[in-house]
Image (cartoon, rainbow, N blue to C red):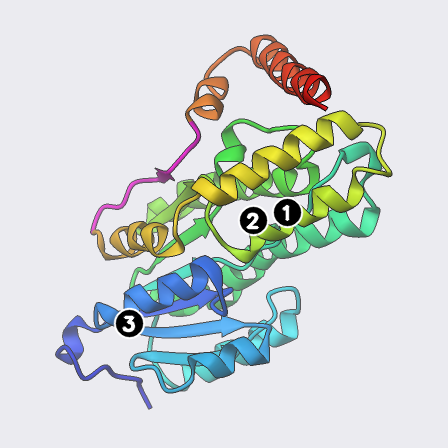
Amino acid sequence: MTVRSNRYPCSSIRHVLVTGAGGGLGAGVCDQLAASGDTVFATDRDPDALRALKGRLGVVPLRMDVTASGDVARARKKIEAMTDGLDGLVCCAGIFQAGALIEADEKEMERALDINVMGAFRTVQAFFPLLTKRSGTVVLVGSELSHCAMPFNGPYTVSKCALQAYADALRRELMFIGMHVVALQPGAIRTALLSSACSTMEGRKDRTLFPAQFDVMRRMLSREWETGMEPADVARVVVRALHSRKPRAIYRVGNDPFRAILGKLPASWTDGLIRVFISLRSSDRRART
């Protein structure tokens, strides 16, 4: 049976799948879509987070772990039984893995790539038949770091750069069949992902070759938590892209001006400025202590 909303006629109902819907940006996107009258298939691996979504008008919670192909296939079968197609797919599921690349554990790198990149790949591939039925839009949640890779966010940055490459290639393929792919490149968002980044950096500062640099990055992350965007503000941009007939290829939201400038400079200039910036902050910290 097709899921329907009571707020709009059937012809205007959009059906959208959201991964990582249990919290943060994913939950914000679900709230915004449901408020606009859309039907949302809200997926997450956390059963407790899904229980919190039950009973919300227009929201259908489903357990799905984007790292497990079998899980994704089972969720697809359930959604196929409820709708004849999808108007949108928003890949919000993601994790933050901080640290120096030379010190990263192999499993940490694999996990970042498995969730942030392969998770999107599996989901898009599995639900593509439903998306083609309504020429649905794919939204991939990347990062501002994809156009300016910063040090000591290694596994996370690598995964988001890979996701951006996936978004670009997918967009240039699906444009031939009239489908849109959108890459969201947000700055800092006040979610659990950002708060976990702060605690991760703090926990590693005593076992790294770069203690002074880690301290600078940790303090930067703490400030970003204080000044970061609310998930609802970023979610509105996602919904606007989904509802647009001609969405932009890339939406940059709340990007840090310094990083934005660095992303446009020659690599040698960017490297030098990052070195000076972090070194000065490290020296300033030592002088004050």
Amino acid under label 3? Ala
Determine whether 249 is above or below 89 in the image: above
Q: Which residue is mark 2?
A: 194
Residue 77 in sight:
no
Q: Is residue 196 magenta?
A: no
Q: Which badge, 1 or 3, comes first in the chain's sequence?
A: 3
Rendered residue at 64%/45% (across/down): 198
Q: Residue at x 79, y 30 (%)?
A: 211
**Quadrant where the N terminus is found in the figure:** bottom left
Q: Mark 3 falls on what kind of element?
A: helix
Q: Please state the total of marks drawn on the protein image.
A: 3
Residue 186 at what x, y percent from top left? 43, 42
Question: Which residue is tagged 1?
Answer: 197
Left-right relation of 83 to 72: left
Magenta part mainly helix, strand or loop? loop
Quarter location, residue 29? bottom left
Write the start and end of the magenta stretch as one range: 245-256
Q: Tell which of 86 and 143 is nearer to you.
A: 143
